[in-house]
Image (spheres, rainbow, N blue to C red):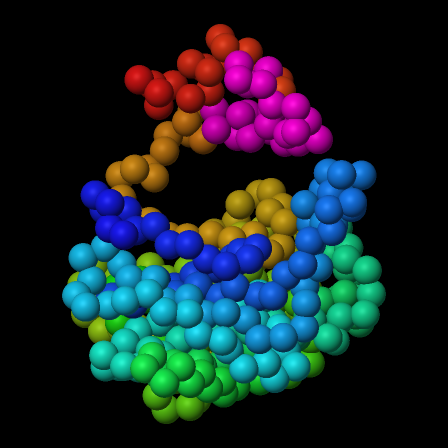
Amino acid sequence: PDKGGIVEADLPGFALLSDFAVTENYSVFFQPPVSTKSVQFLTSKEPAKSLALDQGGALLHLIPRVGSKGARQKTIVVPFDGISDAELQFCNAYEVDEDTIVMDVIRSDGRSATGKSLSWPWATSTDEYSKTSSKKSLWRYKIQISSGVVTKDCTDNVQASFGVINPAVSGKKHRYVYAAVGGRGSDVAPPQGIAKFNIDAGIKEVWMPEGYEFCGEPMFAPKKTGNGEDEGYILSVLYNGRTNESEIVVLDALNIEAGPVSRVPLGIAIPHGYYGCFSATEETGWTAEEIDRRARLADKMESKGNMWNEVKSDFSGLGLRLDDIEEYFGDFFG
């Protein structure tokens, strides 16, 4: 029920939800079939080792948004085609009409990964990376709400990660999806170049950097004077494997193939694969002092990461005393 701007919904079983999307009237969630290992949790206390992903169709939950008109909660069993829907990364979703929802997602097929997961720097060669990483590609899902029919089609089989759109069309019909793509076509490879997919026309544009350079998640920054869906810039953090340093690359979304219109060296190495977002609000216009304060807080919390299960109410489990709170959080709690 709608409780003062909050919608509560009961979901069956163990709900392991990795991502979601919103349309005009619905929030869309995928719940994969999961079983738990109670003994494993009691002995290791590591949640990730206590869960097992089962074979079978996921549950698709359509949860009415606050203020939606006539929408009702519905759960649909998604047909299983041999690939799990546990790690869908939503690019966008929108309603075609009252009975049809379209979603563009980056779909992960973990069946190709045969090696053990690696820590940073993830891999020392593309072959090693391909053995430990899953195949990812751009897919389109269509949902017929009344009949419960779900169809899935691969939009493009190129290795793709971090799919994004212009935020101005979030929850609405979109034409373009931007993503980081691998340098080996449809074969598994680390995110390296930037692609622009024209979903309506079925074509894509790609910019690929040097073989030792790797782009992370693309971020869309709209132009102040632009009104078109692709009138803006794509920002991405590029890691240079030769210099072990990173830079921000800026591409014109109208002409991705032309490559960066600007490159901003950062002077440090940012691990490849980090998520990001663009915001033009004053809220993120931090001073150098504020950035330093937040960085020191992050370092302190990370150094105590193995003590999360022992956090106390006075934050001492993080290595923070009560007199640290004002130093790191300022007037946040004021």
* Residue 185 shows up from this direction: no
Residue 247: x and y in percent read 53, 52
Q: Is residue 173 magenta?
A: no
Magenta span: chief secondary structure: helix
Residue 333: x and y in percent read 35, 20
* Residue 32 shows up from this direction: yes
What is the span of residues highlighted in magenta in the rendered image? 293-316
Q: Is residue 239 left or right of residue 65?
A: right
Q: Residue at x 71, y 59 (%)?
A: 52
Q: Is residue 225 left or right of residue 185?
A: left
* Quarter the C terminus occupies: top left
Q: Quadrant of residue 239?
A: bottom right
Q: Quadrant of residue 147?
A: bottom left
Q: Residue at x 49, y 85 (%)?
A: 152
Q: Is residue 185 left or right of residue 98?
A: right
Q: Residue at x 37, y 54 (%)?
A: 9
Q: Is residue 215 above or below residue 98?
A: above
Total labels drawn:
0
